[in-house]
Image (tube, helix red, strand yellow):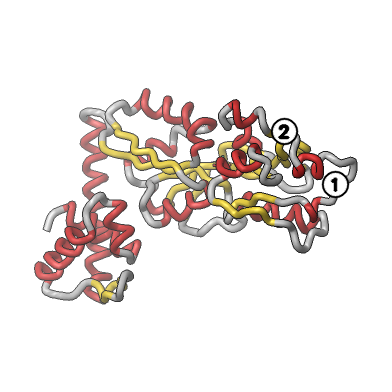
């Protein structure tokens, strides 16, 4: 048994999902399954009860989980102490954020981090900001930029980066949606909306509908990720309510085809921040990043 086996095991013990752990740890599912079998042979007990795709820990598995957690933490602390006396931090830090946040908020943070810790390799994954907290919880990302959800999971720590107002946008080029949306008193309930499928911005929009007493909004499409919404509005498909930073960082040809109707004050702005698993704050790389924020 080596540290790598323990890391694989610990990830699987937390994700309870072979596919997710294999992906996050960059191994094939068959390698993962073989390593776990080898560990089981080593300790002489089954560690997981296997279902089709999901797994649960056995009692022996739970014991090994505690052992693995302590051992890996001690090893990291040892490395940290050695690093304090020797060369600077090295290793890999996995970050997750939206394409927008990678333009708008990540660059100055990464610049600072790289200046202090040039040996650390940054692995950046972009995607739907609404998935950020889950990516951190599952261990697929070490840290992520997220909109603060209505209720933050107790296991997650959150450092705010700023408040992002929502804006109502419509197509700028002549089209039926633009005509409807730019009337003196638009009937919002009759105009097609493009909505994010989940996340804190979506909750803000649902609130906006309630404030405008729209029980059955016209929904043109529900999509994942805010960036795609801007392009659909630019194409004349509908209107949308979204964080202003997404529009500001859209490519210019897209932005030029979009009209901002109003800054939405009836809905609280999105609180953008960096999230991390509290229990991982002791890890040197994560700790170093956290303290630069
Ligand atoms: C939550 C977040 O990262 C943004 C910037 O608002 C977004 O991309 O939607």
Residues marked 1 and 2 touching at CB (< 8 Å) = no
Residue 71 visible (yes or no): no
Question: Going by the image, does 85 lie left or right of 106?
Answer: left
- Residue highlighted by disc 1: 186
Q: In the displayed image of the protein, which residue is found farthest to the top?
A: 115
Q: Earlier in the sequence, mark 1 or mark 2?
A: 2
What is the secondary structure assignment of the residue under circle 1? loop
Q: Which residue is pictured at 75% across the width and 44% down the height?
A: 177
Q: Which residue is pictured at 82% across the width and 39% down the height?
A: 182
Question: Going by the image, does 242 lie left or right of 12?
Answer: right
Question: Going by the image, does 246 lie left or right of 46?
Answer: right
Observer-nearest residue: 161 or 217?
217
Q: Quadrant of the N terminus?
A: bottom left
Q: Residues within 10 Å of mark 1 (few under 14, many from 20)?
A: few
Residue 283: numbered disc = none
Observer-nearest residue: 52 or 203?
52
Q: Which quadrant of the structure image shows residue 251?
A: top right
Q: Which residue is pictured at 56% across the width and 43% down the height?
A: 228
- Residue highlighted by disc 2: 173
Q: Which residue is pictured at 59% across the width and 39% down the height?
A: 231
Q: CA distance from mark 1 to mark 2?
A: 17 Å
x and y percentages locating residue 67 in the rendered image: 23, 62
Residue 227 visible (yes or no): yes
What is the secondary structure assignment of the residue under circle 2? loop
x and y percentages locating residue 227 in the rendered image: 56, 40
| Vertical position of residue 179 compared to residue 16: above or below | above
Mark 2 C-beta closer than 8 Å to ligand 1: no
Observer-nearest residue: 198 or 15?
198
x and y percentages locating residue 245 in the rendered image: 61, 35
Q: Residues within 10 Å of mark 2 (few under 14, many from 20)?
A: some
């Amino acid at each position: 048994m080596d540290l790598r086996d323990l890391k694989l095991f610990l990830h699987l013990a937390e994700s309870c999902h072979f596919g997710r752990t294999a992906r996050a740890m960059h191994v094939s599912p068959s390698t993962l399954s073989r390593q776990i079998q080898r560990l089981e042979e080593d300790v002489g007990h089954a560690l997981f009860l296997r279902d089709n795709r999901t797994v649960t820990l056995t009692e022996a598995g739970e014991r090994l989980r505690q052992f693995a957690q302590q051992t890996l933490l001690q090893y990291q602390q040892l490395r940290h102490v050695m690093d304090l006396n020797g060369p600077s931090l090295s290793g890999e830090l996995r970050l997750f954020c939206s394409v927008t946040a990678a333009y708008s908020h990540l660059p100055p943070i990464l610049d600072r981090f790289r200046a202090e810790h040039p040996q650390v390799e940054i692995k950046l994954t972009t995607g739907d900001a609404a998935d950020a907290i889950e990516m951190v919880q599952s261990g697929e990302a070490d840290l992520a930029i997220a909109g603060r959800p209505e209720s933050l999971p107790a296991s997650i720590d959150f450092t705010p980066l700023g408040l992002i107002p929502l804006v109502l946008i419509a197509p700028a080029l002549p089209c039926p949606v633009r005509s409807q949306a730019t009337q003196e008193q638009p009937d919002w309930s009759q105009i097609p909306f493009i909505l994010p499928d989940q996340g804190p911005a979506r909750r803000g929009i649902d609130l906006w509908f309630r404030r405008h007493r729209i029980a059955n909004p016209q929904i043109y499409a529900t999509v994942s990720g805010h960036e795609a919404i801007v392009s659909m509005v630019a194409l004349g498909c509908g209107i949308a309510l979204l964080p202003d930073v997404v529009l500001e960082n859209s490519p210019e040809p897209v932005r030029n085809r979009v009209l901002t109707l109003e800054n939405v004050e009836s809905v609280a702005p999105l609180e953008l921040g960096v999230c991390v698993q509290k229990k991982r704050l002791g890890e040197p790389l994560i700790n170093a990043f956290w303290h630069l924020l």
